[in-house]
Amino acid sequence: MFRSREVGFKKEAVEALVIRASAIINSSLVLQDSMDDIHEWDTPAEIIIHIVDISDFIINLILVIELSANEMIDSFFDIKSSEKLTAAVKIIDKIVILPWYLELVDGFIFRILISIVVSLMNKWFGNEWDMVIAKTVIYNGGDYIEQVKRSRGL
């Protein structure tokens, strides 16, 4: 079987991941509500005030990307961590509209924020995240971190 790295399909793998993740986001009321809130914040001050909400959204976005990548494991694409990160940045960049002067560096900022959250989740839970809980959180709401801690007795 061809792998994305072997035949140079990195861009196609990212686009396929963005499409699949977008479908999950569109069917998640939790994420739709978060995105509606984010669209209302149009100044850097409002974004800073709502940083906890943005952090929750980033966690949920990461979970959606992970769910999407897991669904695509048997497909033609072999999704790498860098491709997951690129897909997450593309999605959040479409959702968070910043002033023009911040749009020049927003991809870099989003990449750093997402990388930090992924690193923290890996530190807390290891590299194997609970996708059953992730799916429940994405579709029904809740706090992924708290639910995982509870399920692991932490």
Image: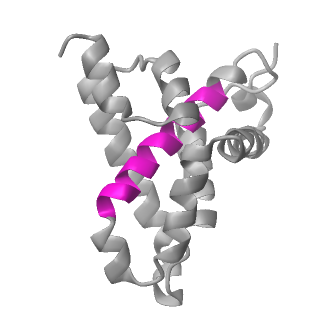
Say whether residue 61 is magenta: yes
Task: Look at the image and tell me whether residue 92 can be seen.
Answer: yes
Which residue sits at x=55%, y=25%? 135
- The relative height of residue 145 versus residue 18 in the rendered view (above or below) is above
Q: Quadrant of residue 51?
A: bottom left
Question: Number of callouts in the render?
Answer: 0
Task: Look at the image and tell me whether residue 86 can be seen.
Answer: no
Q: What stretch of residues is rendered in magenta?
A: 51-69
How far across and down, in percent of the image, does residue 2 sit? 81, 19
Which residue sits at x=63%, y=21%? 70
- The relative height of residue 90 versus residue 72 in the rendered view (above or below) is below
Which residue sits at x=26%, y=11%? 152
Magenta segment's dominant SS is helix
* Residue with the most extreme left position: 154
Q: Nearer the viewer, residue 97 or 110?
A: 97
Left or right: where does residue 105 sit relative to residue 146?
right
